[in-house]
Image (spheres, grey):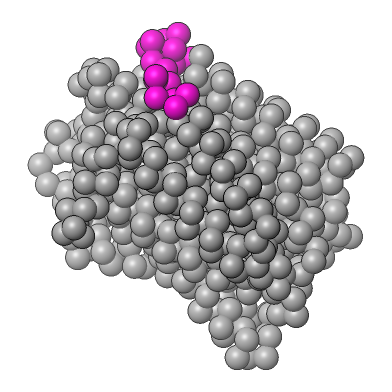
Amino acid sequence: MSSIRRQSIVSSLLIYVGFGFGALNTYLFIKDGLFTPEQYGLTRAFIVIGQFFYGFASFGLTSVFYKFYPYYKDNISGQNKNDLLSITLLVALVGFCLTFAGGVFFESIVVQKFIAKSPLVVKYFYWIFPFTFFLLFFSLLEAYAWSIGKAILPNFLKEAGFRISTTLIIVLFIVTGKNFDLFIKLFSLLYAFSFIALLTYLIRLNEFHIVTEVSRVTKKFWKKMLTLMAYVYGGSLVNIGASSVDFLAIASFQGLRYGAVFDFNSYLASVIQVPQRSLISTTIPVLSRAWKEKDMATIDRIYKRSSLNLLFISIFIFSIIWINYDDAITALDANPIFREGKWVVFFLALKNIIDMGTGVNGQIIATSTYWRFDFFSGVVLLLLAVPLNIYLVKNYGIIGSAWSNLLAYFIYNTIRLLFLKQKFNLQPFSRFTASVLTHGIICFTLTYYLFKGLNGWTGMISRTLFFTFLSGASAWYFNISPDIRQVFETVQKRLRL
């Protein structure tokens, strides 16, 4: 657990560096007079549609690394004989070619759905494919790096590298007299920088080898690998579809400008999830190994600790965002339209708190022998998300999408909780869970009422510092989580305090 904790802390810090650049980029995107809301919305469309295409092209290949890499490692001497990476890269190339062909075939549908409200999507449609290509191959190298225990740099490149590159092309956009055509074409190549950096890193570690000979492990497990890919592929399509439908529905019914409003506020809510992303990357290989060795004690410990720590962190980050929201929008000199998404932040943040508070249930299921359930639970999510989003966005605008996300993911996580409880007698909650919830509510309430009269930068800084000190000091004093004091002691040692 100490190794997971250490890598999670380092990864989270590096990812927050990326979020720092992301905050700068968001400020520049929403600042009145620089980008139009439609232009900002197009960058979000690239990300959403690119991830949607990625889902089709990936064939569920990343799951093969997570599930089967321990078998390759234990049965093949030397990475220069391990053909797993070579096979996945080849299959992914085929997947991308098929996805591109499908995109060309269905272009008329894209034109029909977006030409009226979001014509920029139609104009730059084909530039989404380079974005998809490099996202796909970076994701495969990322999964491979996670499997060999090298999670820190991939996390940094995915979260920070992308955002730092975005900052650079925004600067170029400004100095070239707001040449948006050049900007969006460079934006389509952003994952190329991360892909090249990670590829170079793996080569220097002597961990990247193209193997043409099929190994005995592949010969033994290829049928199981194909079965896993089929289920995970279906599940990933379902999950990506469920997570993409909100923005696509808004862009279709409301236009890119409101897609930008939704995305900006969902970005604020997504800040809460950074620790979850870094924890997932470090727990997957440990969970995979634990399932192989039938070490249920380790799985149970990771499940409970992940739930508790992620719940504490998610409440902490949400509280800072929510008590400073109005002053932050004013201080950022944002286009007034972005303030319309305030309650989007609230409901999406609640969704993220629920998702994090239930721990790494998805990763436990995905690395177990019941990984097929990941597909079926994803189908339920899609069946909930699509009709809810379409109906609620059409009738209530962007807040309807936030409501649909909260309801769909609440049911989705409840199903997973009940499944793990029934099959393995695993559940994420402990006697500390109620303490974490109560602690967060009390700290938020005290901070809100004590600093209610302060506005602007003075209010934001005062509230943030006070809440951080109150929350951290009281969590340590009352020891509301077994990991809290260990984290403080680790930081003290690192800083030699």
Horizontal side of residue 261 vs 438, given as left or right: right
Q: What residue do we see at 67% from left, 64% from top?
A: 455
Quadrant into which the N terminus falls: top left
- Name the image quarter holding residue 496: bottom left
Q: Is residue 153 above or below residue 36?
A: above
Q: Is residue 172 above or below residue 400?
A: below
Horizontal side of residue 311 vs 234, given as left or right: left
* x, y percent for residue 116: 89, 60
**Residue sitting nearer the eye, 454 or 297:** 454
Residue 30 in view, yes or no? no
Residue 16 in view, yes or no? yes
Q: How many marks?
A: 0
Horizontal side of residue 153 vs 312, given as left or right: left
Does the stretch in magenta take in 133? no
Q: What residue do we see at 62% from left, 86% from top?
A: 174
- Name the image quarter holding residue 286: top left
Q: Is residue 353 above or below residue 179?
A: above
Quadrant into which the C terminus falls: bottom left
Q: Which residues are magenta?
A: 419-435
Does the stretch in magenta take in 426? yes
Horizontal side of residue 45 vs 250, given as left or right: left
* x, y percent for residue 87: 33, 45
Q: Is residue 64 above or below residue 81?
A: above
* x, y percent for residue 191: 47, 64
* x, y percent for residue 144: 31, 48
- Name the image quarter holding residue 306: top left
Q: What residue do we see at 76% from left, 69% from top?
A: 335
Q: What residue do we see at 49% from left, 68% from top?
A: 21
